[in-house]
Image: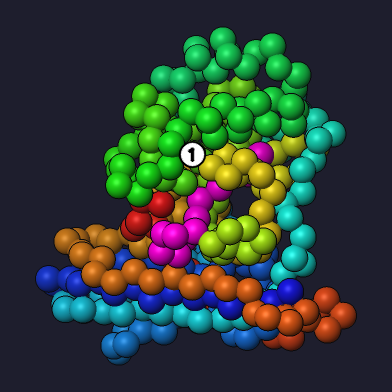
């Protein structure tokens, strides 16, 4: 299947403001691009790309004073298959984990493991290791938090989500990531596109989405505590310890996000020939998450 996706964001700055952007798709999905995916600025702005410590393709700019619009639009091939449920995936002893995975066992800005460790061990210590424990954590988070855009809070941590029992998709992801880490399961936060493909259309405006991945059986597996069921058509943008690392934009000065539009739609009759993508992008620009979803 083919998916058309993109966004239009507008930032208003009082003064020239340095910004870090994580707005491109993840390098692992570039091979699936059917058209180029580049960031387009409505003003003359110098932009240069870099790869952050988590392997995300990011962009640096200095936004001029006034209103700056950033957009992208692209088509991408997707298998059309739902997320894989690795029921037999096993949990590794910590001593056997690769060095680069260890950071995803530690607490972070939004994943306050120290405040949830006692609860996690009381609630989940008797659940079998590996995927059953991950699923038990997802079931708990899915039932514990009520989704509500009105109750979004960019300052809410995992413990805050546990106490408030409300929030948006980032709150589901942060709480699930934190509980997995408390149970010695490496978990990392993910952001990207997730359209209403194969499910009823959401009445809320399209937004970016947050989910997470766990490291079991020697690889990362996609998990979604908000929906708690396999979904079709995820387009990964970035991974990190929590929302701080994958923010759509990090601004170093006062900035107002004045426009926010996201598109993620299946293209009718959009099977790529022989399952092959037509164009692989070489762009290195990406996004950050100013929204709380």
Q: Is residue 284 above or below residue 26?
A: below
Q: How many marks?
A: 1
255 left or right, relative to 24 = left
Q: Is residue 29 above or below residue 172?
A: below
Residue 103's x, y, as percent?
56, 37
Residue 138's x, y, as percent?
60, 33
Q: Is residue 253 above or below residue 223?
A: below
Q: Relative to the observer, which residue lies in front, 55 or 225?
A: 225
**Range shown magenta:** 202-214
80 left or right, relative to 9 = right
Q: Is residue 115 above or below residue 166?
A: above
Residue 213 counted in the magenta span: yes
Task: Identify residue for label 1.
Answer: 172
Residue 102 occupies quadrant: top right
Residue 115's x, y, as percent?
41, 20
Q: Relative to the observer, which residue lies in front, 163 or 120?
A: 163
Residue 193's x, y, as percent?
54, 63
Which residue is pictured at 77% across the width and 60% down the height? Answer: 81
């Amino acid at each position: 299947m083919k998916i058309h996706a993109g966004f239009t964001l507008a930032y208003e700055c009082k003064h020239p403001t340095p910004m870090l952007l994580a707005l491109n798709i993840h390098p692992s999905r570039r091979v699936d691009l059917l058209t180029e995916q580049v960031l387009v600025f409505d003003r003359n702005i110098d932009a240069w790309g870099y790869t952050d410590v988590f392997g995300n393709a990011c962009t640096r700019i200095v936004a001029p004073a006034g209103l700056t619009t950033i957009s992208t639009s692209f088509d991408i091939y997707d298998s059309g298959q739902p997320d894989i449920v690795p029921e037999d995936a096993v949990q590794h002893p910590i001593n056997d984990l690769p060095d680069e995975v260890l950071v995803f066992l530690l607490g972070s800005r939004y994943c306050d493991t120290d405040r949830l460790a006692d609860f996690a061990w009381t609630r989940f210590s008797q659940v079998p290791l590996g995927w059953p424990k991950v699923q038990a954590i997802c079931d708990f988070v899915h039932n514990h938090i009520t989704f509500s855009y009105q109750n979004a809070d960019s300052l809410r941590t995992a413990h805050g989500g546990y106490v408030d029992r409300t929030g948006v998709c980032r709150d589901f992801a942060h709480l699930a990531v934190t509980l997995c880490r408390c149970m010695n399961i490496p978990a990392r936060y993910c952001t990207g596109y997730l359209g209403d493909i194969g499910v009823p259309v959401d009445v809320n405006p399209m937004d970016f989405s947050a989910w997470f991945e766990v490291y079991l059986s020697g690889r990362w597996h996609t998990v979604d505590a908000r929906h708690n069921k396999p979904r079709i058509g995820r387009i990964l943008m970035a991974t990190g310890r929590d929302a701080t690392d994958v923010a759509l934009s990090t601004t170093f000065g006062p900035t107002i996000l004045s426009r926010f539009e996201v598109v993620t739609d299946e293209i009718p009759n959009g099977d790529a020939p022989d399952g092959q993508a037509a164009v692989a992008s070489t762009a290195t620009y990406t996004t950050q998450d100013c929204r709380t979803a």
